[in-house]
Image (cartoon, rainbow, N blue to C red):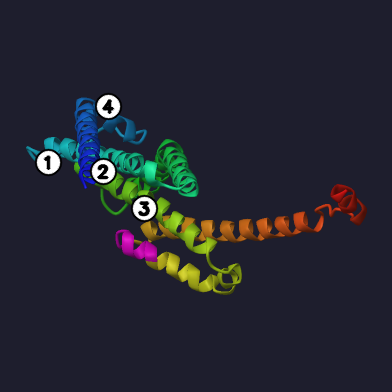
Amino acid sequence: MKKRLQLSIYYLQELNYRLAYTAFGTLLVFYTTYHYKQSIIFIILPQGLSHLVSTGLTETFFTYIELCSTLSFSFSLILILTQIYLFLRPGLYIYETKITQSIFIGGIFFYTCLYVFILPWLIKILWELFSEYSKNFTPIHLTFEPRIKDYLDYIKDLNKILSFSFPLLLGLNIIQRYTPKDLWVKYRGTTYIMAFFIAALITPPDILSQIIIGLPLILFYEIQIIFWSTYTAYQKKILIWKPIKSHQNTLGNKK
């Protein structure tokens, strides 16, 4: 009984330490992002934008706070998941550890590609597409002056949409792994409808956001079907061409 109590106290202390690490890391990220807030905004601004408009006295300040809070909260989620994994790691089986590590590596690779390549390219494309309408408005003279808060809210919504894609793709992969592949081919049309239904639930009510989420889900769905079909054929080929020990070799080994 005394040993169990000591172990419980030890685990509680370790959990408190890991929560303290997470809180300290979140505050450190918030302080760092607030110190370089203007540089961060300058990085995410599209090319060709000469100025932004601020219409409220406290609008710029609260926009900075919202930006830094969003970045620090996103980083804190990574810290929390990492600390939970390190806390549970001694009690996991080997296959559970491998699965968790694969998910972590896949998540790091996915979000690195997302924020380094996909998100800047997508911001550029969407900015050029929608800003062109304001420049070519011929009935009257229309001056397009974007607000800093509206622009950062737009970036935040776009980031939220893209961030949800990894858990959805992960869930789709898990479901597809433990279900018959014939059902996925048979009910392909139903899956397309479900992909856009899920996109409509987690995105703002506009068709563009639903397409941004729905099309990658459908593309990943088709890639998974092709992958598992190719992998099944590859396994069958290995089983067919696997060398079989002859009867004489078997007798020789017995001797």
Element class at badge 3: loop
Q: Distance of mark 4 from mark 1, alpha carbons?
A: 21 Å
Q: Sequence-wise, which precedes: disc 1 or disc 2?
A: 1
- What's the distance in space between the residues labelled 4 and 2, CA to CA? 15 Å
Taking the spot 29% from the left edge, 43% from the top edge, the residue there is 77
Which amino acid, by three-letter code, is at mark 3?
A: Phe
Please state if 174 lies on the left or on the right of 10 as rendered: right
Mark 2 burial class by Cα count in 10 Å: few <14, some 14-19, many 20+: some
Element type where label 2 sits in the image = helix
Give the residues drawn in magenta, as a range.
198-205
Q: Mark 1: which secondary structure? A: loop
- What residue does disc 4 label? 39
Q: Would you identify the image quadrant in which residue 209 lies?
A: bottom left
Q: Earlier in the sequence, mark 4 or mark 3?
A: 4
Magenta includes 22? no
Q: Inspect this view and state whether residue 47 appears.
A: yes
Q: Pointer 3: what residue? A: 164
> Looking at the picture, how far across and down is residue 129, in whole percent?
40, 48
Check residue 201 for magenta coloring.
Answer: yes
- Do the residues bearing badges 1 and 2 touch, measured as CB atoms within 8 Å? no
